[in-house]
Each structure stands twice: as C-alpha cells, then as structure tokens.
Image: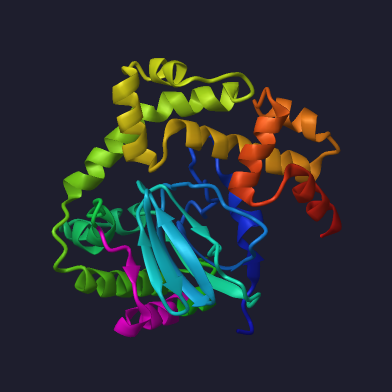
Amino acid sequence: MTGLNWENAFSLINPQINAEGVHVWPFDAAFPLDVRFYMWDKRHHIRMNRHDYFEVFYLQAGELVCRIQDREFQMRSGDLAVISSTQYHTIQWPEKRKNSGQVKAAVLYFLPDLIRAADATGDAVEYLSPFLMQDASFPHLIEANTGIPAQIFDLIRRSHNTMPANTVRARLTLKTYLKMILILLVNHYADHRGTVETFNRKQRAIEQLAPLFDFLEANYKEPVSVATAAKAVHLSESHFMRLFKQVTGQSFVNYLNHFRVAKAEHLLATTDLSIAEVSQAVGFCDQSYFGLVFRSLIQMTPLQYKRQCRIR
C-alpha cells in the first residue's frame, strides 16, 4: 500500500518497554491519539507488554499470532484485535510460517481520557465498554469475514490522513472517526457479559505489583528469587505466584527471563561486549544457561543474534 510510512515494529516498540512490561508511547499531550503502520520480521521478538492506552490492531497483510495473557489468537490478513490497557500481550511471527511474504499491520492507539474528558452524560463508559469488559473469556479477535475490520481499517486510514491534530477541525474529525470505530466495536460486543469491575480489579492488581517492577529495573543484574520478589510486594510466595500469573499471563521466572533477554538483545546489537560479558550484565551467572534461555526465546544463539545485527 503506497503513501504510508511502514516502520519496523520491533525497533519502535521493544526499546520503549520498561521493567513493568509497559510500552510507553509518546502521545501529543493535547490530543492522545496516534496511528502507526508496522512491519514484522521473524528475526525479532517483541516482549510481552501492556500499555496505558487502548489499542486497535488491524492485520493488513500476512499472518501473525496475537498472544494475550496466556491465550493465543491466530491472525490472518484482514483480522482485527482489540486490546485493553490491563492485558499483557505480544504479536509474534507464527512458528510454522515458512513463506517470507510481508507482514504489515495498522494500529490505532488512544488514551481513554480522550473520550472521558468531555463526558457530562456518562456515555463514555459505553463507548469504552469493549475495552473495559475484557475478562478471561473476552473474544479479542474480530475476523475479517464479519466485515467490521475492513470498516475500521478505513477509519484508521482516514484518521492518519487527518493528522496531525493541530487545528480544531482536525481534532473534531479525529474524535468523530474514533467514536465511529468505538460504536462498531460496541455493537459487535453487545452480547458479551463482562463488566467494568473486571477492568478495575485488574488495575488494582497491577498497582499492587508496581513496587516489584521498580525493584527489577534496579536489581535485574543481581540474583532475584521468587521469595525476594514476593517480599518486595509483601505477599506470601504462593499468593504472589498466583497474582503474578493472573496479571501478566506468565510465571515470574519466565517474565524475568524475557526481561533479561530483552536487555541482552539491546547490548548484543549496540555494543562490542562479549557474550560472557552480556550474560553477566543482564543477571545470568552461568553463560551456558544464558545461551539456553536466549535460544529458547529468540530461536537463535546469542552469537548468531550478534552477527545478524552486525550485517543488517
């Protein structure tokens, strides 16, 4: 598709994911809505993450796997995913995909306050209900054959063509397109039985774990046990492990390995540190174990990854 700025998803997203697994997006504070067009390749893997914004993800070409918490959705060209701010998720290259065709997606990000801010009637909750009702059974994927993704993609492109939101008319137009997208989603999910309390409960759980993520950012280079992590949030080990899995969709050990490997990817790509030095720098005391974990998550050895980054 011509006229669009296609960006590498890994390069833009992964560096902005912090220790909490939160993708921080640089919105225009005056109008927190953005549209991006991403390309994927099978060499890179984006960490499981969540974000404070709401996301509408349209797969324009190819196939991808959308993992949300501990569920996976196979996405094909023309499908759309609806992702809230409390859901840890990632978009991955399908393991069994053999062809090398392009994989492209259009995404719309917006902060819910864009809809809530001027709400004097209480209607904002209804507009946002598809994002606030996302419980463990929520059907995040809307398939192409419903016709809804294509309608939403058209509105995303119109939004892109209207940006930047630097005039009153542009802001009114963009908010109108956003509300049209939201109404399409509200109608599609009208029969889902989730409640807003689901969102609020998940948000409280995320806030409860916040001290741990601050601790990890400062101490990931050191040994961090489950007991240490549980102590950071004043919970028993068993309660902590249940809560952490509910919030992130991963065990604590798996989450910590992903976090450390993401740090290692950055060092391998941007420094001349040896594999042993990178292993130590990200908290793996045993280089062999680092290699095993890295390969299991990235599907190549640290050395292969380092060489690949050098020839790009």
Q: 270 or 239: which is nearer to us? A: 239
- Relative to 215, residue 76 above or below: below
* Horizontal side of residue 268 vs 67, given as left or right: right
- Tell me, yes or no, if residue 292 can be seen here: yes
Question: In x, y percent, where is residue 45?
Answer: 60, 53
Residue 76 is drawn in which quadrant?
bottom left
Residue 184 is drawn in which quadrant?
bottom left
Q: Which residues are magenta?
A: 138-156
- Tell me, yes or no, if residue 15 can be seen here: no
Residue 146 shown in magenta: yes
> Which residue corresponds to the image point at 52% horizontal and 55% vertical from the top-left?
28
Residue 98 shown in magenta: no
Question: In x, y percent, where is residue 85?
Answer: 37, 49
> Which residue corresponds to the image point at 25% horizontal and 46% vertical from the top-left?
199
- Relative to 219, residue 100 above or below: below
* Horizontal side of residue 248 vs 43, given as left or right: left
Question: In x, y percent, where is residue 19?
Answer: 53, 34
Pick the quarter of the image with the C terminus. Answer: bottom right
Q: 290 or 19: which is nearer to us? A: 290
> Of helix, strand and loop, which mostly describes the magenta segment?
helix
> Which residue corresponds to the image point at 54% horizontal and 47% vertical from the top-left?
47
